[in-house]
Every structure is written in structure tokens, then in C-alpha cells.
Amino acid sequence: MWIDSILRIGLILILLYVAWIDFHRFLIPNRFTYPMIILGLAFNSLSPMPWCDAHWAWLGAILSYFLLWFINQLYKGIRSRHGLGMGDAKLLAGLGAWLGIHSALWILVLAAFCGMIGGLLWLKYQKLPSNHPFPFGPFLAFAGIIEILWTSPFVHSLI
């Protein structure tokens, strides 16, 4: 159980750092997302105590990435510019690799909801127009942290 807690704390710390970087630089570095994807897939495929079945982890990584890629392509076709960075897609793929497709979809819904509210507040606070870009990675990270904590055996022992 302590290994599970250490992994969850480590993943949360990485998500907090990635959120901070994206908030300040509008960039999610591959040096965080690629290892997150690979380690999540390896953990759920090889561990005796995976967080989800291996096939859900693989679907989580692959479908999460391509869902955001597809949304970005639709947006680009309509608005002639990117609506999402692919760092966001890789971050969601990493969360999907660790937590599975079901959790990744929940994370995306929660992040989108929080992003609409938080993004509008951020734009208003920064006195920027509503069509100005804002970082989505912090909202993905926030939703991912909620899901990591929510699925934790420690949290379930308290409930």
C-alpha cells in the first residue's frame, strides 16, 4: 500500500509542476509526458497491483491522445488555427495510461468544465479578450489530481 501512495504522490507532484510550467510558459514539456505515458503503460501492464487493467490503460493512452488531436483538427478546420496544444493531448494520454480510459474521459470532462469557468476568469483578470488563448494543462492536471486521489485506496479507507 505504501508503494501505491508513493506513486500517487509522485504523479501528483509531477502534475503540479507540469501545471505550473504550462501556466507560465504555455508549454507542457515532452520530458514529462513521454515518461508518464511509458511508465503508466508499463506499470499497468506488468505490475501485480495495477491501477487499471492493461487494456484500459492502453486504450486510455491511445484514445485520449487521439480524442484531443481530433478536437484540435476540427477546431483548426473551423477557425484556421490550433485550439489545443499537443502537450495537452500527451498529458491526457499519460493520465489515461495510469488511470485507464474511463478515468481519462472523466478527467477531460472535469477539466473542460473547470477550464471554461477558470479560463474566462483568468482572461477577465488578465484583461484579455475572450478569444485569447489560455493554458488548458493546469485544468487537466487539477482534474487528474482529483481522480488520482479519488481512486486511492487510502481515500476509500477514510470514506
Image (cartoon, grey):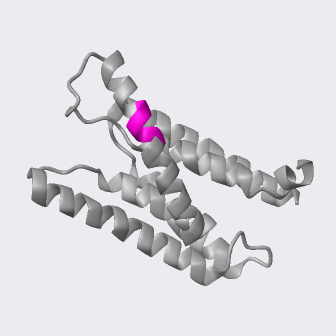
Which residue shows up at 36% across the image and 38% down it?
A: 135
Q: Quadrant of the N terminus?
A: bottom right
Q: Is residue 40 left or right of residue 25?
A: right
Relative to 115, say whether 56 is above or below. below
From this view, report whether residue 39 is shown above or below residue 131: below
Residue 126 position, x and y percent, is: 31, 17
Any part of residue 59 in sight: yes
Q: Main secondary structure of the magenta part?
A: helix
Residue 15 point in image, percent of width and height? 56, 45
On screen, residue 60 versus residue 122, left or right, reads right
Residue at image x 19%, y 56%? 75
Residue extent of the magenta highlight: 114-118
- Looking at the picture, how far across and down is residue 117, in whole percent? 42, 33
In the figure, is residue 149 to the left or right of 33? Answer: right
Decide whether residue 117 is among the magenta residues.
Answer: yes
Whether residue 9 appears in magenta in the rendering, the answer is no
Q: Nearer the viewer, residue 76 or 86?
A: 76
Which image quadrant for residue 2? Answer: bottom right
Q: Residue furthest left?
A: 80
Q: Which one is in front, 113 or 104? A: 113
Q: Is residue 39 visible?
A: no
Number of numbered discs visible in the structure rendering: 0
- Residue at horizontal 48 percent and vertical 33 percent from the top: 20
Q: Give the residue furthest to the bottom.
A: 55
User: Residue at 90% across / 48% down in the picture?
Assistant: 158
x and y, in percent, of residue 65 in the image: 39, 66
